Image: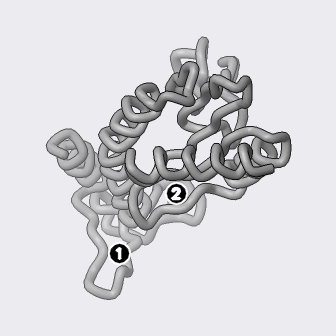
Amino acid sequence: MRRDEEWLAEYRARQGGRTPDTTGHVEDVHPAAAEPLQPAQQALDIGEDVARERVRQRATKALERPILYAVLRAVRAHPGVAWAVRMNTGMATFGATSDGGDGGRTVRFAYQGCADILGQMKDGRLLAIEVKRPGEHPTPAQAANLHTVRQNNGVALCARSSGEAIDGINAQLAVATRG
């Protein structure tokens, strides 16, 4: 969390210490010039609420990681699972120009909606597990991916704990043996 606080302090320093008042309104006056910002400058200048959301997202990702690895350990130990791996997702731009201009190549590390954990059941079916923090839900792309896996006889679920993942696998294995 310290790194996020440093980032927010650095952001505030770049913005001249601007912070929203109790109503959430940010004063649109450039601190150096003490005059209203031009619309173009306002468009370039992201607000404090965006900075806070980025800090919140970083904290959220940090809290999901231990759940993800606990689920992965439990799934790998399940007797019906042949193998399971963590899928790294996201994208990055490589080869951008030094002035920040275009020219870089954007690379996506997995397809949109890819589950956090992919694997194979010992009976040959695909295993896809989306890991979320308690109270969080899959994005529409993630939900569609899980639905597609289920529709094609795979084992797909959203888990918020290792116990929930094991219960979900067992439930889908029980349905497969009955059907």
Check disc 1 and report the residue beneath it.
27
Please, which residue is most extreme toward the top here?
Answer: 95
Q: Amino acid at mark 1?
A: Glu
Between 74 and 159, the one lying in front of the other is 74
Is residue 99 among what the camera can see? Answer: yes
**Mark toward the start of the polypeptide (2 vs 1):** 1
| Residue 41, numbered circle | 2
User: In the picture, residue 22 is in which quadrant?
Assistant: bottom left
Q: Residue furthest bottom?
A: 23
Q: Residues within 10 Å of mark 1 (few under 14, many from 20)?
A: few
Which residue appears at 76% of the width and 47% of the height?
150
Q: For mark 2, give the secondary structure.
A: helix
Distance from Cα at disc 2 to Cα at disc 1: 13 Å
Asked if 88 appears above or below 130 in the picture, the reply is above
Q: Residue at x 71, y 30 (%)?
A: 126
The vertical placement of 104 against 156, above or below, is above
Circle 2: residue type: Gln
Q: Which mark is residue 150?
A: none
Residue 157 in picture, x, y percent from top left: 60, 49
Residue 96 lies in quadrant = top right
Residue found farthest to the front: 178
Which residue is found at the position 43% from the left and 60% from the top? Answer: 50
